Structures are given as C-alpha cells and as structure tokens.
Image (cartoon, grey):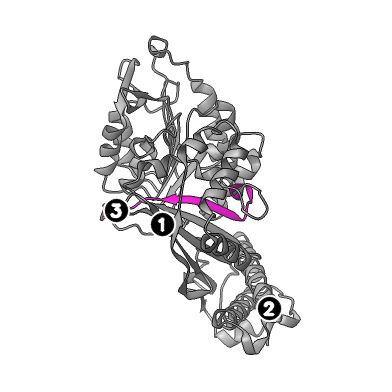
Amino acid sequence: MLTTVELTIRRLPNGSRSGDARLTSDVSAAATQLAANAPVVLDQAALNAVEHDPAAYGALLAAQLFADQRLRHAWLKARAFAATGDLQLRLNLDASDAMLHALRWETLRDPETDQPVALYERVRLVRTLDSADLTPVIVPPRPELCALVVVSNPSNLGTFGLTEVDVDGEVARARAALGDIPATILADTADAAGRATLARIAAQLRAAPPLVILVAHGTLVDDQPILWLEQADGTADPVASDTFVAVVGRLTTRPLFLALLSCQSAGRGYGDTLRALGPGLARAGVPAVLAFQGDVAMSTVKTLLPTLITELRRDGQIDRALAATRGALGDKRPWWQAVLWLRTDGRLWREELSTLPTTGGISIGGSVGTMQVVTVTGGSVGSIIGSQHTYGAPHAPAASGRDEAITTQRRRLAQHRETLAHYLEQLAITGLAHARPEVTAGLREARAGIARAKQALAALGASAEDMPDDTP
C-alpha cells in the first residue's frame, strides 16, 4: 500500500506563509484533507547558522514547520495510516518563493522520533514543481530500457579552476550500474559516440532514451548556473542552464529520468535554487529529475549511482529507488544532497508481464486498474483452472515466462496480504461499528486482490497457501 501526503506551502500576499496537508492512498478513491491554512513561519537566518550540521538543520526545520499543531498532527496521522506500507511525502512548494526552495528539506526530521525522515526506506521524500508544459505525461509499460551516459571533461578545465573528471572511471561506473541496459556514451573515450557537446547531446536526446545520466562540473558564473560541456575540439563550453533547459524543452519526447551528477545542479541553498538546472528541467516537463544541492563529492556519486539504478530496475519506482539509495548512503555521508523533482506519482513505467505464447496456453497481461487480465487460449477456462494441464495447447508456456508470471503473482499476493493485515489492525482498534469507510473498503479490495492472485497462480499451475484471513 502506498500513501501520499502532499504538503503544500504557499506565500500569501502579505508575505506570510501557510500550509495544507492532503492524504491520498491507493486503497481509496477519495482524498482526505488533514490540515488547511496552517501558519508556517520559517527563519532562514537561524537555519543558515546551522547549515554545516545536517542533524541540527533538520531538527530546526522540523520545529519551525510543525510548530502549528495542525501540521504536526497531520504528519503523525499520515505516518500512522501508512505504518504497514510506504509513505510518499510530496513537497509542493510555492514556485514564486525562492527562499522556500532554497531550504534543505531533505534533512527534515520526524517531530516525534527526531530521526531523518528521508532515511526511512519506506518514506519517499520528493519535491514537485508546477510546469506550464502541456505535453501529456503518460506512464508507459516497461520500455525496452536504454540509457544515454554523458561525461564531460573539457581539456582546459584547469584554466577555470576546475578539477579534471575521471572519464574512464565514470563511464565504467555508469556501465556497471546499468548492467545489461544498453548505453550510448558521449565522452572522450575510445568507444564513445562522440564528445559531450551540446549538439551531440541534443541529437541523442531526440532518440528518446528513457534514462539519461549526465556527469559534468556545475558552477555559478555571475549568478548564472553553468554546465561545463565540451566543444568539438575538446575545450570547455560553459553552457547556461537556461540554454540546456531550452534544448530539452523543445524535444518531442523527453527522458523519463534525468540524473544530473554535477555540483550545484539543485542550487547552493542561498535563494538560487529555482535558477538551477534541476528545477529548470522539472519545469520543462521531464517527469523525474535528480540533482544535487551544493558541491557533491565523487565518492558520494560512486556509491549512489549503482544502488539507484539497481533499485530502479526492480519496479520503475524512482521515488522508492532513491529512498533505498539514501538509506544505503547512511547518515555518515551527505544523503540529503540528492533532490528529486517528480511530475508523476513516482512510477517511470508500469510493470507488465510479458505475454506468453498465443498458440495455446495462458497469458497474463498487465493491470487495468486493479484487475489482472488472464487470457486462456486453446482450451476452456474451466479445463485449465480445474487441472494443471493445458488442453488443446501444442506446447506449454516457456519456462522463463511462466516463472516470471508466478513470481509476480506471488509478490502481488504478499502485497495484498500486507494491506489486509493493516486494515485488520485498524478494524481491531475501532471495532466494526466505528470503522471508517476506507477501512471496510480496503478490506474488501485487499481480499479481492488476494482472490485474483490465487486464481492467476492456479491458472499457471502453481500452488497458493490459503490463510485464515483471506476470506471474511
């Protein structure tokens, strides 16, 4: 079960700020307003005074944010509701309030436990930015994944006081993280498709690679964010962030995910965040953008990238993948520097099962809402579900496809049972007479999901243990 609490903070005409908290869940079609128009008083000077101590910064930020009991209770209520599932904390910050975006929200600590919110792997802390882009954002079925990896190391970086980038090392690490995902490389290396020039990057982006990883220096020059790319001869081409954003914004299809592994790609935290490359790309319509606050150490990137890609490949959930990656970095590294802007609910693609042979047998398609589609060919539904044979089918489904289908159905069965346990616990606390409508509805939906998963497993000839709570 995934619960989302959207925390919206807006600046009012008189210069003060207020906050709302709204809860949605994948087990209910209705949203719940947890808090509205709660005053939010943020003292940037006090926060800046402890900026070199992430623990103190996060605690002070929490004290200021949750000073009004309505927002504090809203957070604690959402956390309790999602106790047996995952919780997405979605920060919707006023796009006209530069100071608000400059704060290090990723350091936020729980007001009750005083632990960093973003270091709980079941809490997905993300930001969202309104975009004027009208291009529809459609969460597609899992694509045939490919990646574009850009590593920029201009030959004259030293002239500008910048250190050399380890091109071979960065390319090797990116390839290791991507595994069997094919990658096009733009870098000064032997098997690359060319140098990391703006023109070549634009040309490769037109091929619509779902994943883009960009490693380059990022700085501020005259308060303008700069991305240090290469010219055709290998010398530096300092590209303004607005120029790079415009190139991406003109594309017909944008990457699903763009990782900016460069310093200050999410700003420095001095009120310049909205001018940085990361939020600029989010506003241009890229569904998911990862960037970094301040100067990021390459040792952080070396740990972050392999974990992030490995986790992302599991289910296409970039917010969950980043939560797991922050946990892997641990509290000894600056896990809070990674900032994720999302336009989707966190999914970059939908997980759908491969269709099994259509000459006969069983195929299980992807989900339509919460219903799984089971197609039987070469025999009747009754004959196939009633036994472990596929009558009328010349060949059994390929073992790899069948195994994948069984694994997916067992995972769904476990997820539905976890959701069921949550609602049964809620029911035990309140009693049936006082149960909230979403609890009884959640019980029905969880049990329906359990029944569907069992039926699909039976159709695949796989066993499914009956549990006492599976039925009322």
Amino acid residing under circle 1: Ser
Q: What stretch is highlighted in magenta?
A: 117-133
Please give the label number shown on residue 324. Answer: none
- Which dot, 3 or 2, sits closer to the camera? 3
Could you tell me which secondary element the residue under label 1 belongs to? strand
Q: Tally the marks.
A: 3
Of 431 and 451, nearer the camera is 431
Q: Can residue 131 be seen in this view?
A: yes
**Residue at image coords 53%, 51%:** 125
Residue 132 among magenta residues: yes
**Which mark, by number, is residue 18?**
1
Distance from disc 3 to disc 2, alpha carbons, whole Å, reads: 46 Å
Q: How far apart are marks 1 and 2 (CA)?
A: 36 Å
Q: Which residue lies furthest to the top in this view?
A: 159
Give neighbour class at mark 2: few <14, some 14-19, many 20+ (Cα, 10 Å): some
Instruction: Identify the residue position indicated by label 2 in the image.
Output: 424
Element under label 3? loop
Question: Mark 1, mark 2: which one is toward the viewer?
Answer: 1
Q: Which residue is drawn at 74% across and 76% down?
A: 465
Q: Is residue 350 visible?
A: no
